[in-house]
Image (cartoon, rainbow, N blue to C red):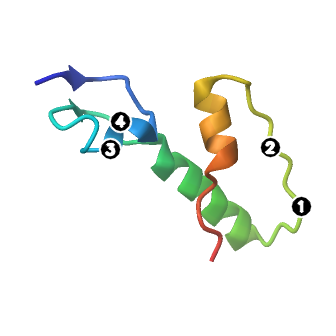
């Protein structure tokens, strides 16, 4: 069973693809959700996002968390 201490990609949470993978650090999904919660709590109406054109950056850009 692979164990990772640094892999934070949400893709690795897909148990159909990575059935036996586990990690000791939470997925980046939770960090992004926390940032969205802060923006909503503060009441900002405009936010600019800077990301890198890599598998990591593009995934965040294409799959933002829900803004309820």
Q: State whether residue 23 is above or below residue 35.
A: above
Q: Earlier in the sequence, mark 3 or mark 1?
A: 3
Residue at 75% x, 32% y is 51
Q: Earlier in the sequence, mark 2 or mark 4?
A: 4
Badge 1 vs badge 4, beta-carbon distance below 8 Å: no
Q: Nearer the viewer, mark 1 or mark 4?
A: 4
Marks 3 and 1, how far apart at CA: 32 Å
Q: State whether residue 58 is above or below residue 61.
A: above
Q: State whether residue 3 is above or below residue 29.
A: above
Circle 4: is it few (<14), some (14-19), or many (20+) Cα within 10 Å? some
**Tag 4 residue:** 12
Badge 4 vs badge 3, beta-carbon distance below 8 Å: yes
Identify the element where label 1 is drawn: loop
Q: Which mark is residue 14?
A: 3
Among the 4 quarters of the image, the one containing residue 64: bottom right
**Tag 1 residue:** 46
Does residue 59 appear left or right of residue 39 in this picture?
left
Q: Position of residue 52 (x, y in %)?
A: 73, 25
Q: Nearer the viewer, mark 3 or mark 2?
A: 3
Residue at 42% x, 33% y is 8
Among the 4 quarters of the image, the one containing residue 25: top left
Q: Nearer the viewer, mark 3 or mark 1?
A: 3
**Tag 2 residue:** 49
Q: Nearer the viewer, mark 2 or mark 4?
A: 4
Identify the element where label 4 is drawn: helix
Q: Earlier in the sequence, mark 3 or mark 2?
A: 3
Circle 2: is it few (<14), some (14-19), or many (20+) Cα within 10 Å? few
Does residue 51 appear left or right of residue 57 in this picture?
right
Badge 2 vs badge 4, beta-carbon distance below 8 Å: no
Q: Position of residue 62 (x, y in %)?
A: 67, 47
Q: Position of residue 59 (x, y in %)?
A: 60, 39
Is 38 or 47 nearer to us in this picture?
47
């Amino acid at each position: 069973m692979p164990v990772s201490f640094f892999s934070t990609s949400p893709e690795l949470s897909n148990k159909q693809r990575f059935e036996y993978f586990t990690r000791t650090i939470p997925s980046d999904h939770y960090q992004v959700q926390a940032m969205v919660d802060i923006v909503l709590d503060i009441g900002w109406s405009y936010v600019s996002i800077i990301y890198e054109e890599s598998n990591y950056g593009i995934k965040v850009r294409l799959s933002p968390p829900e803004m309820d």
